[in-house]
Each structure stands twice: as structure tokens, then as C-alpha cells.
């Protein structure tokens, strides 16, 4: 399992959190996810044999949220 934190451009409301978390929970290979409203960060624990970090960033981007970086 890999843990990554993605910095997003903005997460401006509770519905944004629900939208991102809902998508991540439905994504195969992602075990845990948490969207941090105050810092616009997303923490994800995932199985790197099932999904890659770039695919996660792409899925977040398709929802309309720009990923600025990752740790």
C-alpha cells in the first residue's frame, strides 16, 4: 500500500468534499481516502498494483479540481 497526499487548487464547499470522496471510494484499488477542506488536500491510501498515482490525479482532474502537487 502507498499513501499519497495531493494538493488541490481549491476545495470550496462540503459538496466538493462529498464529490471527491464519493468518486475515490468507488475506485478499485483505493483503500482509504480523506479530503481536508481547510488545506485543500486529499489523502489516499491505495494498492499500486491496481491503480497508479497518475490515474488518481486524472480522476480528480476530471471532476474539475486541479492537482497542484503530491507528496
Image (spheres, rainbow, N blue to C red):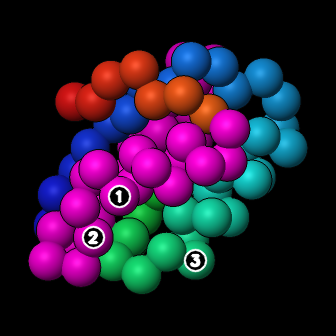
Mark 3 closeness class: few <14, some 14–19, many ≥20 residues within 10 Å: few
Is disc 3 placed on a helix, strand or loop?
helix
Q: Is residue 32 visible?
A: yes
- Do tag 3 and tag 2 residues touch (Cβ < 8 Å)? no
Please tell me which residue lies in front, 56 or 39.
56
> Magenta includes 49?
yes
Name the secondary structure under disc 2. loop
What residue range appears in magenta? 35-64
Q: Quadrant of residue 2?
A: bottom left
Q: Which dot, 3 or 1, sits closer to the camera?
A: 1
At horizontal 55% and vertical 42% (from top left) the residue drawn is 61
Name the residue that disc number 1 marks: 55
Q: Which mark is residue 51?
A: 2
| Circle 2/circle 1 CB separation < 8 Å | yes
Element type at marker 1? helix
- Residue 71 lies, in percent from the top left, at 22, 30
Task: Return the x and y of residue 17 as percentages of the image width and height.
Answer: 71, 43
Report how far apart the C-alphas of labels 2 and 1 lie in the structure. Answer: 7 Å
Upstream in the sequence, badge 3 or badge 1? 3
Disc 3 versus disc 1: distance between alpha carbons? 14 Å
Quadrant that contains the N terminus: bottom left
Disc on res. 26: 3
First reached walking from the N terminus: tag 3 or tag 2: 3
Q: CA distance from mark 3 to mark 2?
A: 13 Å
Name the front one of labels 3 and 2: 2
Identify the residue at horizontal 39%, vertical 55% (top origin): 56
Q: Residue at x 49, y 75 (%)?
A: 27
Amino acid at each position: 500500500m502507498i499513501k499519497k497526499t495531493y494538493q488541490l487548487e481549491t476545495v470550496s464547499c462540503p459538496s466538493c468534499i462529498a464529490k471527491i470522496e464519493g468518486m475515490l471510494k468507488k475506485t478499485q484499488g483505493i483503500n482509504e481516502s480523506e479530503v481536508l477542506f481547510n488545506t485543500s488536500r486529499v489523502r489516499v491510501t491505495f494498492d499500486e498494483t491496481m491503480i497508479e498515482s497518475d490515474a488518481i490525479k486524472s480522476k480528480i482532474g476530471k471532476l474539475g479540481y486541479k492537482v497542484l502537487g503530491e507528496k
